[in-house]
Every structure is written in structure tokens, then in C-alpha cells.
Amino acid sequence: MLSITVLLAGTVGGVVLTASSDLNQRTPTVARSTGDFVTGPSGGCGVNTVSIRHAGGDPVPADELEVAVALPDSDARIVDLPVSGTALAASNTDDPDNLIYDYCVGGVIANGGQRWSAGRAITFQLNAGGGTVGPGDTIEVRVVHVPTNGVLATVELTARR
């Protein structure tokens, strides 16, 4: 009975120490960011390209980022970043409605990744087929800091033809 109590106390103590160390981690500050929704061909990607530019604040490693995209009727996440090339694998998306186009990502989340810092962008493409993005749709993009689950940037864009 004593050994079970000691083992349980050690397990609970380890969980408490792990949880308290997570509480001490601070979400980086991205002072501001800008976004563009490009409807024509753009830097190797086709139509419906989203680009979120870091305009000031703390640099953040690409492996600490996720991108959440919300449309009026669907949402998706780009996860497990960075990717080694310019295409997303199935493990890089949580996308039940096929909102994200898998074959075109760029900026700091592509080609092995870089730090998202002032002047650098996160770029990806949305699917145009199947009615996923229509003219006038509001597209909300959030860049999330994975270790703290803090939102680094939120940009609202409007789809145009």
C-alpha cells in the first residue's frame, strides 16, 4: 500500500510540474499583420491564394505555427508545419470540407520552414472548385502559436472574382 501511494504521489507530482512549466511559456507578440487574397496567378500558386504577412513583433519558428481558416460554412487547419516542399500531405491538414488546396504552400511554412518574422509571409491556396470559396465570402485566417495555443494574428479577407 505504501509503494502504491509513493508511486501515485510521484505521478501526480510529475503531472503538476509539467503543467506548471507549460503555464510559464509566453505567447509571442506579433504587433500587427496584413493579409491579401489574390484571385489571379500568384508566385507559383493559382487563384485564391492567401498571404499573411508578419509586419512587426516577435519572430516565431515555423514549427510552432498552425493556420486556421474559417468560411461561412466550413473551416480547416494547416498543421504539423513546416512542410519539406511546397505541397501539403494528408497529415498537414485538418480539412473535412477540402477547403485548402494541397499543392501550393509558400513562405515560411514551405521548404523546411523559416522563422515567421517582420516582412515574411505565410502563403497557401484555397480550393475554388466545389463551391468552397465564392465571391463575397468572408475568409477569417488565424495564425496560432501551437505551444501556448495563443492567436498570433487574425486577418479577415473578402473573396472577389
Image (spheres, helix red, strand yellow):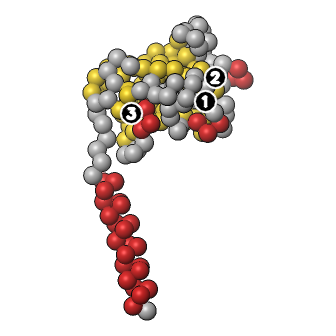
Q: Work out which quarter of the rendered image holds the C terminus and state it.
A: top right
- Residue that protrudes farthest toward the top in the picture: 40
For image coordinates 36% across by 78% down, the residue present is 9
Q: Which residue bears the numbered disc 1?
A: 88
Quarter the N terminus occupies:
bottom left
x, y percent for residue 95: 62, 36
Q: Amino acid at mark 1?
A: Leu
**Do callouts 2 and 3 mark residues in contact (Cβ within 8 Å)?**
no
Circles 3 and 1 in contact, beta carbons < 8 Å: no
Q: Report the front residue among 100 and 103.
A: 103
Q: Which mark is residue 103?
A: 2
Which sits in the foreground, 108 or 24? 108
Residue extending farthest bottom:
1
**Mark 3 Cα within 10 Å, few/some/many (few <14, many 20+)?**
some
Sooner in the amino-acid sequence: mark 2 or mark 1: 1
The residue at the far right in this view is: 130
Please tell me whether mark 3 sits on a helix, a strand or a loop: strand
Q: Earlier in the sequence, mark 2 or mark 3?
A: 3
